[in-house]
Amino acid sequence: CGNTQGCFPVTVTPAPTAAISGTGAVCAGSGNSINLTITLTGAAPWDVVYSVGGTPTSITINSSPHTLPVTTIGTYTLVSVSDANGCDGTVSGTGTLNQNPLPTATLSGNGSICQGSGNQVGLTITLTGNGPWTVDWTSDGDPQTPLVINASPFTLNINQALSGIIELTGV
């Protein structure tokens, strides 16, 4: 510096950045959550505003990357970020929580078996939703071993020992 005017250091601080990412799905009405990730640059802590469905939410994040558990269905976007230096930064990315509909199971078919014949009657179970499915069922009101079904439709073969009223009780 060498002059009598004095020296004054000026520090340029890079602007912070924040990016959100992640995708997942939950079953309707389950109340389950997924984790989205927010990755940040700049000086911690950061004040971040994110939005889902037009509703903004402010959070303070102390370290990067940050795990954000979410339960509200929709697309998450970042609105703003500022860091410990008071610098405003740029935001990017989206995170998405989708909702899978509840699965359904429909039983169809009927038939008769001659006693002692060893024959079977094939009943069809048609399922919606994402497999694999676990289907609970009864024969004449007696609970049977749950079926684990990987593809729909599924044929349930009923022999003489299981004959009677077949009912699906859960999926």
Image (tube, rainbow, N blue to C red):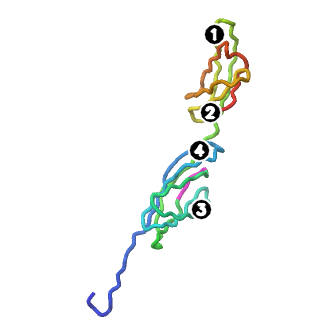
Q: Which mark is residue 119?
A: 1
- Mark 4: secondary structure: strand
> Which quadrant of the structure image shows residue 159?
top right
**Residue located 48% across and 62% down the image:** 91
From mark 1 to mark 2, how far is it between C-alphas? 29 Å
Q: Earlier in the sequence, mark 1 or mark 4?
A: 4
Q: Neighbour class for label 3 at 10 Å: few (<14), some, many (≥20)?
A: few
> Disc 4 designates what residue?
26
Amino acid at pointer 1:
Asn
Q: Earlier in the sequence, mark 2 or mark 3?
A: 3
Highlighted magenta segment, given as a residue range:
73-77
> Disc 3 designates what residue?
56
Amino acid at pointer 3:
Pro
Q: Neighbour class for label 1 at 10 Å: few (<14), some, many (≥20)?
A: some
- 23 left or right of 140? left
Q: Is residue 110 above or below residue 63?
A: above
Which quarter shows the C terminus? top right
Secondary structure character of the magenta stretch overall: strand
Q: Earlier in the sequence, mark 2 or mark 4?
A: 4
From mark 3 to mark 4, how far is it between C-alphas? 22 Å
Which quarter shows the N terminus? bottom left
> Disc 2 designates what residue?
128
From mark 1 to mark 3, how far is it between C-alphas? 63 Å
From mark 1 to mark 4, how far is it between C-alphas? 42 Å
- Mark 1: secondary structure: loop
